[in-house]
Image (spheres, helix red, strand yellow):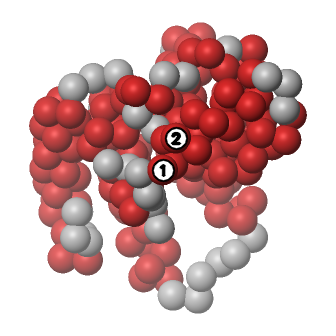
């Protein structure tokens, strides 16, 4: 399940791990990486559609954390939201350098080829592809909230920390994103298959 069901002690546990790492405990960083790297990687993968770029971004985030462990403030939220915020900054920097995102249709094909798992149900593949395409077509500010809240199941508060905005902004962007997705899927005749 996602972070919505994480216990309150996760923030204090993350704070303790960061303090242990700052004191020289390398095992603490290993635990942080094992716990939080999957979410960072998934966020980067959903945002880029490219496994290699996602892996590079996830690695960059944890290398950055090695040099900046004091930047995490547990009073502002969970460590996973903070790390996703760092990943977002790396992605934005990469986006500015490249000045474009990879065409999602190519990224989806590459994702399927790399996974090597073709589902037997062609309709399900088609539905998933249509949804991925619709999400990828969203403007960046809306795509981010859909990835965080709907795909990664982050709370509004955790998404707000990651995006460095107010919770109300997350809610309004998510509402608008779902509306845009609904229109796009309805126009393609796909709406009845999804509950966005």
Q: Which mark is residue 9?
A: 1
Nearer to me, 78 or 148 = 78
Nearer to me, 133 or 79 = 79
Residue 18, how many percent across, how many down?
66, 30
Q: Is residue 1 left or right of residue 118?
A: left
Classify mark 1: helix, strand or loop.
helix
Q: Residue at x 54, y 22 (%)?
A: 72
Nearer to me, 98 or 169 = 169
Q: Residue at x 27, y 43 (%)?
A: 156
Which quadrant of the figure contains the C terminus? bottom left
As measured in the structure, the alpha-carbon distance from the residue carrying label 1 to the one carrying label 2 is 5 Å
- Crowding at mark 2 (Cα within 10 Å: few <14, some 14-19, many 20+): some
Classify mark 2: helix, strand or loop.
helix
Q: Which mark is residue 12?
A: 2
Vertically, is 181 above or below 50? below
Residue 165, how many percent across, how many down?
27, 23
Nearer to me, 102 or 28 = 28
Q: How many marks?
A: 2
Residue 57 visible from this viewpoint: no
Residue 148, how many percent across, how many down?
39, 45
Residue 182, how many percent across, how many down?
16, 57
Marks 1/2 in contact by CB < 8 Å: the verdict is yes
Vertically, is 42 above or below 115? above
Q: Which mark is residue 186?
A: none
Residue at the far top: name it.
Answer: 97
Vertically, is 153 above or below 106? below
Q: Is residue 26 left or right of residue 194?
A: right
Residue at the far bottom: name it.
Answer: 120
Q: Quadrant of residue 45?
A: top right
């Amino acid at each position: 399940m996602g972070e919505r069901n994480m216990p309150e002690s996760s923030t204090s546990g993350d704070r303790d791990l960061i303090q242990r790492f700052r004191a020289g405990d390398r095992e603490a960083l290993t635990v942080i990486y094992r716990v939080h790297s999957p979410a960072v990687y998934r966020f980067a993968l959903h945002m880029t559609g490219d496994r290699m770029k996602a892996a590079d971004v996830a690695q960059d985030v944890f290398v950055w954390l090695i040099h900046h462990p004091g930047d995490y403030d547990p009073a502002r939220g969970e460590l996973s939201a903070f790390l996703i915020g760092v990943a977002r900054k790396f992605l934005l920097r990469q986006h500015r350098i490249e000045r474009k995102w990879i065409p999602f249709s190519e990224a989806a094909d590459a994702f399927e080829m790399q996974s090597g798992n073709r589902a037997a149900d062609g309709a399900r593949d088609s539905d998933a592809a249509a949804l991925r395409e619709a999400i990828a077509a969203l403007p960046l500010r809306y795509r981010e909230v859909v990835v965080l809240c709907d795909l990664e199941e982050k709370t509004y508060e955790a998404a707000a920390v990651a995006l460095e905005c107010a919770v109300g902004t997350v809610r309004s962007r998510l509402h608008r994103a779902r509306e845009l997705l609904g229109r796009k899927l309805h126009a393609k005749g796909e709406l009845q298959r999804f509950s966005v």
